[in-house]
Amino acid sequence: MGSKGRQRRNVVRFPAPVRQMWVAGAVLAVLSAAANMAGPLYPTYQQMWAMSDLTMTALYATFAVVAVPSLLLFGPAADALGRKPVLVIGLACALGGTVLFAVDGGVPVLFLGRVLLGMGLGMGTGAGVAMMVEASPPLRPTLGSTSATLVFVGGSGFGPLMAGAAAQYLPAPTTVPFVVMSVLVVLALASVCTLDGPLLPARQRWRPTRPAVPVSMRHSFVIAGITGFLGWTVAGVFLALLPSVTESVMATPNRAVSGAVVGAVLLCSALSQPVAPRLEPRAAQTIGLTALAVGMTLLVSSYLPLFDGGRALVLVAVAAVISGCGHGISYWGASREVDTLTPHRSRAGVTAALYLSFYAGAGFPAVAAGMLSLATPLTIAIPVVSMVLVLAIVVFLPVPSLVQTPIFHRAHREIPRARVAEPEDALLRKAM
């Protein structure tokens, strides 16, 4: 009995890989959707609670400000305590934040809700991505990381799309969307609780992740980091600021249309990423940045008096689609280049530094527009921020091509398979 009991305690049990992949993907999708779903409702909150433009933009930026330290602090906790406990805590935080938005308790309650949503996403990102990567089949080692990117971005687009439609066509527009999302978070939480373990044989020391980039890859990291920053800054313009623009150009404000335009950016981003692996990472960054510049130029053009409400809205929608495709391709190129060059021992620090640039980009437009709104109306501050962003993308656009690689990925060129070198991350996995 005693020996059998000791044997049972020493057994390390892992969830079935396929189920683990699905559950972790659902968690990432729900967390990202919950964190971004309030976008179409910001104009409603501003009117309801008489918020200033600065307060409204600060409400959005709170998420990014909290998500960064949460990712750095709790990312290593998934290694020290296990994936499952961290996902449970992250989902509990997201549930609390979503419920606070549903109760309509005033501006302080909304800020507290954004804090909890940022904490939940920061916790769940590291643990969820790690769980999906671990579930990747041996013959497709990049399936987990690729799928994690798709569900994260897709969830970010689904959130505002669902919230806008529910707020427009269902009663209680500031309550019902968050009740629906609360149910989805509870279902995701229940799915995580049904997973077995894993029971880690040893506990690692829990300490925050310090952003660090090896000297050998800093040049490439800077290029990829700026590309990611610019891509997520464009996404931040649409997520945080565009609902105010779309409602101002429509004769009758429609939250469903605002949510559809905002959601289209990240949904198009998710749909474009399966095509991106055909490109070399540096070429993907260049092509993606070009699309971002075109999309943002169309967005800036929609502010001109030349376009009336209907035509301006069409132009904004086209800008959202093009910008979304550019975001997806550039985001993949930046992430893939860093992932390929990162030594295994430095992966945690490099990943933390890269996501720091992503979250900083997502929060920057709201902060910049909020500061400008102290001296000028938000309807003027948003075009100014957009024009500065267009100029920044155009100035940086030639940089990824200065050390130009071939456009198409070597796996898609007609080269005998035996002569195609394996990616560095595949060699690292074999060595391990």
Image (cartoon, rainbow, N blue to C red):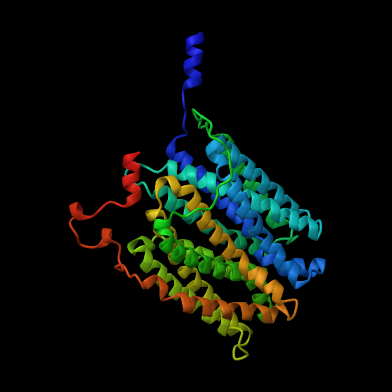
Residue 251 visible from this viewpoint: no
x and y, in percent, of residue 368 in the image: 66, 72
x and y, in percent, of residue 163 in the image: 65, 61
Which quarter of the figure has residue 44?
A: bottom right
Find the residue positioned furthest to the top. Answer: 1
x and y, in percent, of residue 388 in the image: 57, 79
Q: Look at 45% across and 48% down and name the residue there.
A: 346
- Is 166 situated left or right of 397 in this image? right
> From what the image shows, is residue 231 above or below residue 191?
below
- Is 230 situated left or right of 88 in this image? left
x and y, in percent, of residue 324 in the image: 50, 68
Which quarter of the figure has residue 136?
A: top left
- Is 355 situated left or right of 113 in this image? left
Q: Nearer the viewer, residue 141 or 22?
A: 141
Q: Look at 51% across and 14% down and name the residue there.
A: 5
Residue 112 visible from this viewpoint: yes
Q: Look at 56% across and 58% down and name the residue there.
A: 356
- Is 387 situated left or right of 244 in this image? left
Quarter placement of the C terminus: top left
